[in-house]
Amino acid sequence: MYPAVLLFVIRDSINAGKPLIAAMVHHSGSIQSFKQQKGMHTSISEILKEKSPKPSRRSLPCLAQSQTHPLNLNHFLSVPLSPDPKLEAEGLSQSVSTSCSLLPPHTAEEGNDQYVEESEVTTCETKTDESIPLKKPSTRVKLQARNDSVKGKNSAGSSGLFFRDGKKRVDYILVYKKSSPQVEKRCTFEKNLRAEGLMLEKEPSLTNNDIMFVKVQAPWDTLCKYAEQMNIRMPFRKKSYFTDWKSKTLGSRFHLRCRQIKSWLPRNPMKLDKEALPDLEETDCYTAPFSRARMHHFTINNREAFFSNSTRSRIIHHVLQRTKYEDGKSKMGINRLLGNNTYEAAFPPHEGGYKSRHPIKTHGAQNHRHLLYERWARWGMWYKYQPLDLIRRYFGEKIGLYFAWLGWYTGMLIPAALVGVFVFLYGLFTMDSSQVSKEICEANNTIMCPMCEDTCEPWTLSDSCVYAKVTHLFDNGGTVFFAIFMAIWATVFLEFWKRRRAELTYDWDLIDWEEEEEELRPQFEAKYSRVERVNPISGKPEPFQPFSDKLSRLMVSVSGIFFMISLVLTAVFAVVVFRLIAMEKFASFNWYFVKKNWQFATSGTGVCINFMIIMSLNVVYEKVAYLLTNLEHPRTESEWENSFSLKMFLFQFVNLNSSTFYIAFFLGRFAGRPGKYNKLFNRWRLEECHPSGCLIDLCLQMGVIMFFKQIWNNFMELGYPLLQNWWSRRKMKKRGGGGPNVENKAQLPQWDKDWNLQPMNAHGLVDEYLEMVLQFGFTTIFVAAFPLAPLLALLNNIIEIRLDAYKFVTQWRRPMPARATDIGIWHGILEGIGVLAVITNAFVIAITSDYIPRFVYAFKYGPCVDKGHHHKNECLRGYMNSSLSVFEMRDPKNNNQSLYCRYRDYRAPPWSSVPYEFTLQFWHVLAARLAFIIVFEHLVYGIKSFIAYLIPDMPKGLCDRMRREKYLMQETMYESELTHLQKERKKKGRRYNHEWP
């Protein structure tokens, strides 16, 4: 047997052009594996028949043991999945040669545009065939299809994922222009990067002769060094659980019966196909902060795969942020170099293309990006759950939490949308039978006072029949119920999100990740490096911002915020003035249709102009918020993001809702009465509400802004990047490029492809969260006036998830994978919106709508007061006549004879002893409105607090698992330390049989 092995080794070394001694060293560790491969076809089939235990999808995956990890595909694909006579004829050494190499990687060729440093010989343990954790037979074809992509890694120019030696994987890309004058800074920066242990290699762009790419890779020693400094948690042992904990607590028979019943039910079509996502099936491990002194505790089967791609990117980004490019404490960081155009961009590369010539069902996914596109970003997957574990692994925990929250919010909108549609349909079906609408439509003899000065004429109440019926769609008996329901819904949504977040943070190993582990911002370190203070947590000196400096900067920032809010209020005031001018113009318009519907014309044009002002001011607010946040000099990136997010929310919330608040609570409240109207600047008469109320104006304002804003946001998120990428490709073709591969985009290296994509927004996920939080405010704050708001939000979010997914996977460069334990300051903002929603809905129902006046009339002044029955329509008979007051005016067309007109108010008639004074009914309605606000707020707040008390923030099962994990981690660390000490003593020739260890 051994001579045969030697012959294969000699022949393989000759074909590969390697030294014989190196080939023998390479194969010496695989003799046992070679023996088994001699009859591998039977052994592999037996292995495939074995059912591996299905691991629980929890905590940090043991990526170093995952056969679907890109760097472990070599080991996995080295075993043939079916008999191949050609392979046997050529010799079995090919399958052996694809296993882990024990030789040091070849040093790349030296050149002017190349910098490479080898810090150590990278080795990894070999595996026999039995040690390869194969999956089910159904994944054979998928994994076999990946072989082509893995074999192509030796051609770095074609894939663009490796250095020129085809072994070192590219972890980060730096881009600069050859024509840039910042040569000295760049050379110093790259020299310091190599001093920190990073490997660099330069490549020219194939699409632009002026662009150079710097490929960055972190070797093993550098990764270990910074992983320890950054307290990165790494796997050290496979997890063990109670195998039958449900049967012990619920009873084995009952649990078995439940499983049988569940198996009879049809499969949920929204669930992900586990066979289509083999990468989600990984071995889970306990994790602990990495330490080089205790490296033997960690599960390191393959050094190249021990640190995931996202972890490697985080480490390199950490080094880039703290490397100097000039002398001086403030001259550091890639952000400053990007700001002064030393570098054009810095990003981690994508793992390859997102499309394939072959279908994923038959040939499998080429890489994680391709898998994300097929199972998440495609429009055909709109009804499927999101692969959150895969999103988190590729883009990082921070982006994963955003999509988890967005999916949770979208799912919770389903019951709210259904109830809102039910309330709207209730108003639609009862529109014709409404007593108020009937009285308005039949009031042909009721003359109403002119709605404006000079140009307006008296009109009949029946002219507003359509207006009254549309108002009933949104102002009916279901309004109060829906307002209470949405207040409770907001509380349930936030409380159950806390539970969902707790599960995700535990599954993604974020429980112990605290702010103290977060690095200081380089700008903060550079600004306050002269003043240091001992950190009470770590005990190490760090830069410190004095309280006086922080207070002065905060005061300037607050002043800027108030100035911008005052600018918003000024814009709203300008819109109000426009509405007053447009009201008179439309009332005297020559077109009969416009003249008859001048109220709709005034409201519609006012809303459109207000929308354009809102979108214009948003651009200004973003720049001002960025400047004010940088002026404050936040300590960490999370503090910077929270401060910037709060400013952006305050600016845009006031900008978006100020006009809505005006219509809801101020429109028509200060107009005065006929003969004594209040005028703006003694010229324009203030606007009045329609006899059926101002709720329809509020509904129109919300509907138009919400609809057009969602369309605009979706265009800016997808349409704008598509146009930018198209324009970049057009300029590239027009310029002629710099190489033969320009015409064929598929042949470009990955760094060239990524460079032509758009970078992620400089503010990260702030814009994404801001859009959804503002939508949440629209959905809850004024939902009593617009019950269809949850439905519009639901439809938009279904599109939003796929738009964001498509944007992240196909149109944007891969962002730096960042970590986060929650959604940041946005959770507190959501809770604040939930509290504000109760107050605003109480005021909308009590003041804006006519629900309280109708209620008071039915039980105090209506025909049902002295009767035993209280039929709704019967009790509201005569309501419109009761809600309209009388005014005596002069008719210029009839010799100034007296003419009595009606207007909307509770005032005494002109023949009364106290003409035009408020009647007793006015004070009854006012008291009822105030009483309703107090009762509604206390009732809803009580229900919200009770629900929040009943729902714990963390599931009980999760608490038990966390306690058990803590216990097992202590036991594991003790056993590992004991085993390590025993091995050390055996090496020294000592044996202690009766004492520890």
Image (cartoon, rainbow, N blue to C red):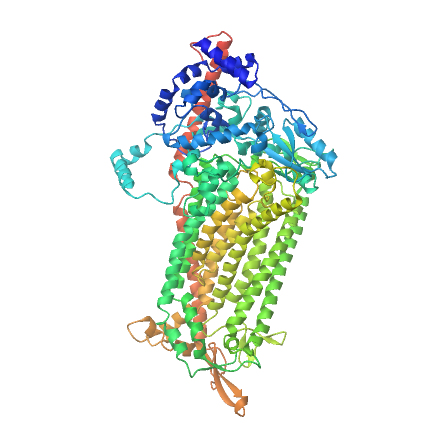
- Expressed as whole percent of the image width and height from the top left, the position of residue 896 reads 54, 90
Taking 890 as reference, is 422 left or right?
left
Image quadrant where one finds the N terminus: top left
- In depth, the one of 504 and 204 nearer the eye is 204
Quarter of the view holding residue 47: top left
Which of 508 and 951 lies nearest the eye of the viewer?
A: 508
Which x, y percent locates residue 340? 70, 41
529 is higher (above) or lower (below) than 471: above
User: Is residue 739 or residue 197 the one in the foreground?
Assistant: 739
**661 up-or-down from 808: above or below:** below
Q: Residue at x 38, y 70 (%)?
A: 855
- Residue drawn at x 53%, y 63% as measured from the top left: 661
**Coordinates of residue 77 in the picture (x, y in percent):** 45, 26
* Viewer can see residue 636: no
- From this view, report whether residue 607 is shown above or below residue 818: below
The picture quadrant where one finds residue 877 is bottom left
